[in-house]
Image (cartoon, rainbow, N blue to C red):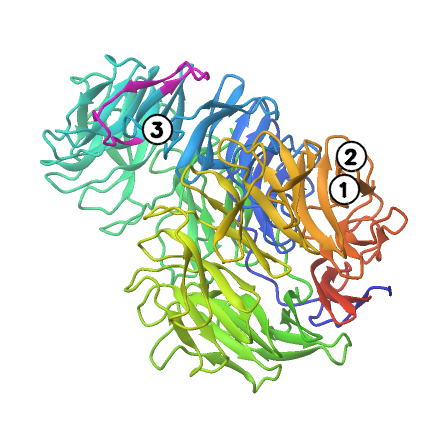
Amino acid sequence: MGTPERVRDIRSPVSTPSNDGSSPGDVVKIGNTFFFAASDARHGEELWASDGTPAGTHLVRDIHPGPEGSGMRQFAVMNGVLYFIAFDGGTREQLWRSDGTPEGTRPVAEQGPIVDGASFAVMGDALYFAGGEGEEVSLWKTDGTSAGTVLVKDFDPNGPSQLQRLVHVNGTLYLVARDGVHGKELWMSDGTEAGTTLVKDLNPGGADTWFEQMVEFNGALFFLAEVPGHGAELWKTDGTEAGTVMVKDINPGIDPSFPYNFQPVGSTLYFSAYHGAFGYELWKTDGTEAGTVMVKDINPGAEFSEPGNLQDFKGTLYFTATDGVSGRELWKSDGTEAGTVRVIDVRPGAEDGMSSSLTQAGGRLYFVPPFSLWSTTAELWTSDGTAAGTVALRNFSVGSGGYPIRLPEDPVSADTLFFSANDGVHGLELWKTDGTLPGTVLVVDVNPPDRGSAPRFLMDVNGTTYFVATGDSGTGLWKSDGTEAGTVRVKEGFSAPFRELRAVGNALFFSLQSSSVFELWWSDGTEAGTRRIKPRPGWSWSPSWNLTEVNGMLYFTSSAGGGGSELWKSDGTEAGTVQVKDIRPGSSSSLPQNLVNVGGTLYFTADDGVNGLELWKSDGTEAGTRLVADMVPGPGSSSPSLLTVVEGHLFFTASDEEFQREMWTLDASGAPRRIPVSAPGASGSWPEMLTGVGNTLFFVTNTFTTLELWKYDGMSEGATLVSRGRFEAIYSLAAVGNTLCFSAREAESGTELWCSDGTDAGTHRVKDILPGPLGGVERTPLLGLPEGLLFFRASDGVHGSELWVTDGTTAGTRMVGDIAPGTRSSDPRELTRSGQHLFFRADDGTQGAEPWRVPL
């Protein structure tokens, strides 16, 4: 094997600065550290930490290595530890925890449930969350350890519980769920299954009650609920059936008052509500019917003042509203009609001076007046609560789209406001302010101007590597034969970002997609031969995806001319681009997915509106496109997925009528046959990571209690266990000649590279690249070659993230080259074999991310 070399420096090291920014999310403070999610060109959206200075702002961990990001969301803090949902590139989102260090940022429980993310609630020393998939979720809790992550209650084992709205009130957890007997109702829990009980069936029988706006006030839970005979009104509960009552029928009868924007201030709960005679106005309650009254009819009569953005500021209620003369402006109230007054008319006259943003920090209010997308600037304002103390603080750039200033709903610092803004130079980045102009400063430029061409979508087309890259004149389609002279631009000037590339014969198909542009293209490798394919004159595509080659024809999912998303095919010409079959006639969509070529026949999943989501196949004709089997008879769905071909045989996962998720194949007649996997979990064995090695299928099962590696050779009736309970996590499987290799994590050695001959005794760690609990192998896809070589990303603690190779032996496992010398990382990705070269993207630290190659 040769030495890595850069193929061509496509983009000059100094280019026009990017104005994208890192789009930081809301900030969470733990001690003196501020945590937030932000995105840069190399890592995508990941977890960052800051002490409020540029030098003290850093990436905590690249959870999902590469530019895709981990999509982290739903922050919560318990006992000084940050909890959140993230995706590390495996098969599902998980609950993670972080203490601010790379080694302390890890999944809470590798075999834990899929985290629904509806809401978190901290009660005592446990974090409560909804765990499961779709509507079939249960109540779980965790103390931050794997062993302490346990199921509290499965409300409806045979149906959707639709668990949501977790709220902790004075030592009791409240939530909304279905149990299969009652509809969606209010429940309470002390953290045990026995102590998780229905509070009250507000809508008796199986019908749902609608709940919104749940908030703690004076030791009770106040909420919006809609029950028979009344509209959506204000309710409260003390956790008993007798103590669960409507506070007041504000808008009497079946018409709703829709109370919302709850904000406690001292011993008063303020909110907005509708009354037929007064419209939407400001109300308050002390928890009694008599004490629930309108504060003031700000916009007299039936017109709406629509109070919003309610804030407890220094013991006084501040909010936004309109009195019908002025636009939406800043108001305050002491709870009396006379004491409810406008603070300032930011924009005199009927024009709004306040938008939906109002927050506070350091004894000051902050807001952004409305602005036009055609404006060049937007203003950040601050207020001490008086007209004289309400002033414009700083202008920011509206730019080319998006919101230029984003204020957090729940500020985290007692004296400083952290927010995201675009100054027109750095893009949308993290800023802070103390309420003064000198104190309004950029914290850090997380996503500085791009360097390098950032090659992506690498695709081999009969020995030529095609890719997308950004040169000095813009983004375009490129190709390379592995030499600098043979690395040339095919075409540039496309109207939308690239979405997917697929080789068909000697040609390349690719799709483009933006919010308003959906295009399908074909290329023979020349500029003149790169053309857009239209479905027919006057029609336009919806998004086109699932590009799959079968017998020299491209199959894909799309819609055109007002129809639903169906199965299409193309030979690269407009005349040869046609819908194969309207599986679900009309404007509805069958949404074909999981397209795969099985010996010249296309298999896929679709929903025809009659049989649910099931397995289909097609020979490319309308008559030859048909349902393989209705595995769950009637409108129910088996939801086949992970369609994988091994030596001409199709394997996939699917659910049966008992909701058991198992491994399936097709028998000699073409009918689905379940492959027995012993000791399945309560909901099946949940096979993942289906990978063919020769004529053997390997896969991983995760029953949420143990992780197992299995194999199936087609000769026996059922699958054979390879290894059970040995690994905390398995991340990626790859065939290396006739051997299976994979990245996996053990408690003692962290994430390293393993190989297996299909037996437990023959499953061994190849090399301990970075000794210790972290391990040296990154959670990125592995590239195995038939010659018996495997390429992967790793760091040995001396060098940064670099390209490594192994032949399956300890001695044959080495770093291919130190592309970014020392501890810096070249961040290799997009590994693609083309002819006798391995192409990939890497950054040597001087020229930016460019295309590289290694002779094999």
Which residue shows up at 80% across the image and 61% down it?
Answer: 787
- Name which residue type carries label 3: Ala
Mark 2–mark 3 distance (CA, rounded to whole Å)? 41 Å
313 vs 668, left or right, is left
First along the sequence among labels 1 and 3 = 3
Answer whether residue 20 is visible to the viewer in this image. Answer: yes
Instruction: Classify residue 712 as left or right of residue 27.
Output: right
* Magenta segment boundaries in residue numbering: 188-212
- SS type, badge 1: strand
> In the displayed structure, would residue 135 be above or below residue 89?
above
Q: Foreground: 218 or 305?
A: 218
Label 2 sits on a secondary structure element that is: loop
Label 1 and label 3: CA atoms lie apart by 41 Å
Residue 323 spot, x, y in % from top left: 19, 41
Name which of mark 2 and mark 3 comes first in the sequence: 3
Is the residue 18 above or below the residue 503 in the image? Answer: above
Q: What residue is disc 2 on?
A: 749
316 or 133: nearer the viewer: 133
On residue 752, the disc is 1
Q: Which residue is mark 3?
A: 177
Residue 759 horizontal/vertical position (percent)? 75, 40
Q: Amino acid at mark 2?
A: Ser
